[in-house]
Image (cartoon, rainbow, N blue to C red):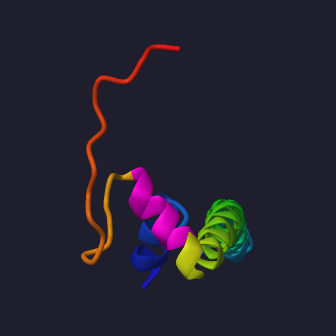
Amino acid sequence: MASAAATARTAGPRARVRWDRLGRVAMLCVLVVLAYLYLSAGVHLLSTWHQARGERAKVAAMQREHGTLQRQHEALGNAGAVEAQARKLGMMRHDERPYIVSNLPND
């Protein structure tokens, strides 16, 4: 029995768990994970805000275009405007007789 005690003393101290170090390492790991989660949420929030700004700009451009198209629609809504546009393009009604005038004086 004495030889077992002597062997244990000469073998050196047994490796024991240092709970204070393990606790610090665990707390550090938890802190790193929390920091990562907060940073990823912040990056996602910033990305969403930036995307929303771009979408608002697109909506504003589309609203301006919609207003322009509505004004054009109202302007072309009456028959006189449609006929004036057709005459600018050289069109005429099917019941009209075309005349071609040539050899006019230059004054």
Q: Where does the image place residue 62, in percent across and percent down from the top left?
A: 61, 68
Reply yes or no: does residue 39 show up in magenta. Answer: no
| Extreme residue in the top direction | 106
For the point 26% across and 43% down, which residue is it?
100
The N terminus sits in image quarter: bottom left
Q: Where does the image place residue 52, in percent across and percent down from the top left?
A: 68, 69
Q: Which residues are magenta?
A: 81-88
Is residue 49 in view from this perspective?
yes
For the point 55% across and 64% down, which residue is it?
13
Of 56 and 30, the residue lying toward us = 56
Q: Where does the image place residue 99, in percent across and percent down from the top left?
A: 28, 51
Q: Where does the image place residue 53, in percent across and percent down from the top left?
A: 71, 62
For the point 56% across and 69% down, which residue is it?
81
Of 91 and 34, the residue lying toward us = 91
Q: Is residue 30 found left or right of 96 in the rendered image?
A: right
For the stretch drawn in magenta, the main secondary structure is helix
Reply yes or no: does residue 84 show up in magenta. Answer: yes
Of 36 and 54, the residue lying toward us = 54
